[in-house]
Image (spheres, coloured by chain):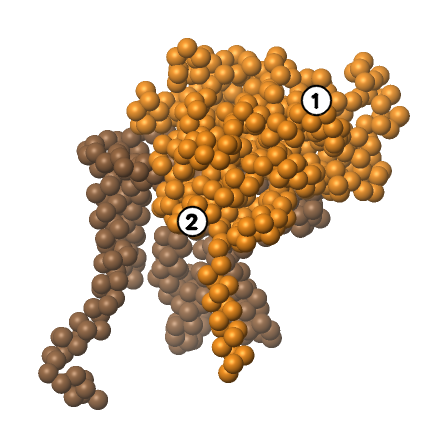
Chain colours: A orange, B brown
Amino acid sequence: MILLFVSLFSFSVNSNAKSITLGWAAWDPANALQELTKEFTAETGIEVNFEFVPWPNFADRMLNELNNKGKTFDLLIGDSQWIGAGAVYGHYVKLNDFFDKEGISMSDFSPATVYAYSTWPKGSENYYALPAMGDALAWAYRKDWFDRPELKSEFKKKHGYDLGVPANWNQLHDMCKFFQGREIDGQKRYGAAINTERGSEGITMGVTAAMYAWGMEYENPNKPYDMEGYFNSPQAVEAVEFYRKLYEDCAPPGHSDAYMVANLDAYKSGQVAFQMNWYAFWPGVSKEDSDGRVSGFFANPKQNVAAATLGGQGISVVKYSDKQDLALEYIKWFARPDVQQKWWDLGGYSCHNDVLNSPSFPTSTVYAQGFLDSMGIVKDFWQEPTFVELMLPMQEAIHDYVVNGKGTAKEALDKIIEEWVEVFEADGKL
Amino acid sequence: MNVKKKFKGLSDKAVGWLFIGPTVLLLLAINIYPLVYAIKMSFTNFYANKIGREPQFVGLKNYIKVLNKEAIWEKMQVTASFMFWTLLLQAIIGLGLALLLNRKFKGNELLTTLIVLPMMLSPAVVGVFWTYLYNPQVGLFNYVVNFFYDLGSFDMIGSSTLAPWAIVIVDTWMWTPFTMLICLAGLRSVPNYLYEAAEVDRASKWQQFIYITLPSVLPFLLLALLFRGIENFKMFDMVVELTSGGPGSATELASINLKREAFEKWKTGYSSAFAVILFVTIFGFGNVYVKVMNKIKER
């Protein structure tokens, strides 16, 4: 009886212990954060529970939770595009006063990440998140194949330049096509695993990597929400046509609804020479190089301009949480430069200047320099509160054109503008 | 036992209401109220995710918008085509299997159990494992097709021509057993003396099938198709898992589009109008169908 009483008592003490819940996507960096957070618990005694949601359901799950004013999460590492909705609909706590009180300065973080992950309206000094995980879309390639003398000489003979990191998208296409259907070590290989996913954001993130490099702008810089001639400019049309060509000429069979995990799988199984993916995955990819596989990494190639699709997230305190004080304590701890350094060491992508500007940073990993390069040229999708409504028509129209082969690139972009106008009108922006 | 004895003081009518009351309340709460609420919403510009914004009455604007939208008609065409082919195949194969299993042979029970297995599975699970079966590199489906006829590598899910067939095949594989079971019930209800009389009249097997079997089993078959038609009109989970409505919008059924408009784009007013239109469509078709079915029964 005494033992039972003691165990019941200890359970009740335990359940009363201070704890918070953090929500994020289920992927490699989340595991690194879980590891890092053990130090926070050791320092403060605050338990942190994690709820990681698979990427395809991440936005649905989290945004439904916020829209329903749910209390499941105290902290949320939300996508960059959510910041508008988080601020406008009051889902996120505004952090300015807290930052001032705790001496956390946004100038200590990379400007591109502060702009993208923390501010609303964009570029203002209203902060709703602390930059947590810097990320951009980039490329990994089979360096071991690229280094083979017979392949190098064959490629040079065919194209007149060296097989290596492509300087632009045309070269990327040449190289991908070079590997398409080629037999290496007795197996048929393919060119590139690129984003083609239709359900959430995959193909948009992929095609915009090309569109940004071609110089696409979403809107007239002098007249917000005026998209005609910008989003469907000849350069944008050319970029979308190019992406379709890349898909048709270089994607492995069955790669018609693929995003992060499918790209990783195609690469890891040795099917493809290139994969398009987020920096977040490169620690895992480089660590898992084995059986002769050597991976190289590079930032999104330029075409007319140097640009890359922004990924990454900021960490926010959920307005509906009953434990905002504990959640803020976590942010205070996470903002510390020493914690940020450990974050990078564990495989997370710190946005803190002390980490990024450290002389040893560019050589700390094979992909660190690429990450620095990318974070200087990132561009993001609309961060409007209505970003989901803006994302879905683009997903559908681009998938219809690139994968389904329906219509023309211009028609697809025109259709997207038509839908976007409707969304902005309903939102009172037009 | 006299019910009155058990419920002293309550009339039979009251006892009846006592039994059906909870069900009626439940139906009102989870069926009728949402329906009425959706109809009300369909006349507003309500967005469920725009907190604090009061919905405004917009009259028939949402209905006009839905009916004038080319994309909606494309989804309706995709849905109609999916329904036509699945119902046709399920009717033919289901009836064929029922005729086969209506005969007595060794292993009949085992074969029936095996055939019925697919419909016991969750549609989401079916969607997921068929994506693997359809994989152009390692999928069993391609292997089997190529075993009989060398088509090389083809992508059932990635091709806009093949993807609609991919979902038809999976639905047929999964739900033909249902049609078969209903038809089998119909076949087993045909009195044997009809066949004996036909034999005496020297009717051929084909004539027996046309004049006895088919008319007897037809009401059952039509009933099965009614159920399948209603189900396939609102088909969602299996197709989402299999193709997500793609490639492009080649397999985006009306129900998938409705979910996207309602719970991803959060156009609550607009999607309510779309839902009402879908409801009226299936309700109307269902009623006409039942009337036709009753006429066939009366013959």
Between residue B86 and residue B5, name the one nearer to us: B5
Toward which corner of the image does residue B149 lie, by quadrant? Answer: top right
Toward which corner of the image does residue A317 lie, by quadrant? Answer: top left
Q: Are marks 1 and 2 in contact (CB under 8 Å)?
A: no
- Report helix, strand or loop for mark 2: loop
Chain that bears disc 1: A
Residue sitting at 25 percent across and 66 percent down? B23
Residue sitting at 42 percent across and 42 percent down? A318
Between residue A333 and residue B200, name the one nearer to us: A333
Residue B98 pos. (x, y %): 49, 65
> Is residue A428 visible in the rendered structure shown here?
yes
Toward which corner of the image does residue A197 lie, by quadrant? Answer: top right
Q: Left or right of B45: which side holds B8? A: left
- Report helix, strand or loop for mark 1: helix
Residue sitting at 39 percent across and 71 percent down? B190
According to the picture, the residue beneath numbered tag 1 turns out to be A172
Crowdedness of circle 2 by 10 Å Cα count: few (<14), some, many (20+)? Answer: some
> Is residue B119 visible in the rendered structure shown here?
no
Q: Which image quarter holds the C terminus of chain A?
A: top left
Amino acid type, label 2: Lys
As drawn, A149 above or below B204:
above
Point out the tag, 1 or 2, that comes first from the N-terminus: 1
According to the picture, the residue beneath numbered tag 2 turns out to be A323
Residue A142 pos. (x, y %): 77, 32
As drawn, B164 above or below B24:
above
Name, please, the residue furthest toward the right: A149
Q: Left or right of B250: which side holds A286? A: right
